[in-house]
Image (tube, helix red, strand yellow):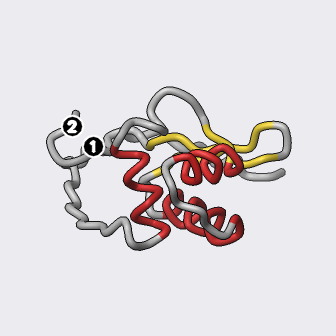
Amino acid sequence: SEAKETRKRREIKMEKTVKEVTVSDATTKGKILTLASEGYFNKEWRKAGEVIQKLAEVGWTLNANVVMMELAKLSKEGILGRKKEQNQWVYHLAPNVTFNGKG
């Protein structure tokens, strides 16, 4: 007979981690974070194509592949949340992320 392993759920309390980052909008990452700081990712999940289009609207024409790479990196860093919707990644500001006095 197989031994059944039971796992108990434990609640672990952690202190809030505050990480301060200074970003320049001279970089692709900085441009995306500028949009994020203006609330672009707050209300709805955004497709990479929408982000690229929004960047172009504000005067930043960027390589689509570079933007997609940076979105994925920001997701890995915990700044943006990411999920699949209709076979496409969509992005949203991660919970507990605030920008310099905003939130």
Q: Is 53 left, or right, of 80 in this rendering? A: right
Q: Is 84 left, or right, of 62 in this rendering? A: right
Tag 2: amino acid: Lys
Q: Residues within 10 Å of mark 1 (few under 14, many from 20)?
A: some
- Which element carries disc 2, helix, strand or loop? loop
Query: Residue 17: image x %, image y %?
Result: 22, 54
Q: Nearer the viewer, residue 18 or 24?
A: 24
Report the label total: 2
Viewer-nearest of discs 2 and 1: 2
Going 49% across and 49% down the picture, which residue do you hit? 58
Q: Nearer the viewer, residue 75 or 43?
A: 43
Q: Which residue is mark 1?
A: 98
Tag 1: amino acid: Thr
Q: Are marks 2 and 1 in contact (CB under 8 Å)?
A: yes
Query: Residue 52: image x %, image y %?
Result: 63, 53
Q: Nearer the viewer, residue 78 or 9?
A: 78
Q: Which residue is mark 2?
A: 102
Going 56% across and 29% down the picture, which residue do you hit? 44
Q: Does 93 appear above or below 29?
A: above
Going 25% across and 43% down the picture, which residue do you hit? 13
Q: Residues within 10 Å of mark 2 (few under 14, many from 20)?
A: few
Query: Residue 91: image x %, image y %?
Result: 59, 45
Query: Residue 56: image x %, image y %?
Result: 59, 53
- Which element carries disc 1, helix, strand or loop? loop
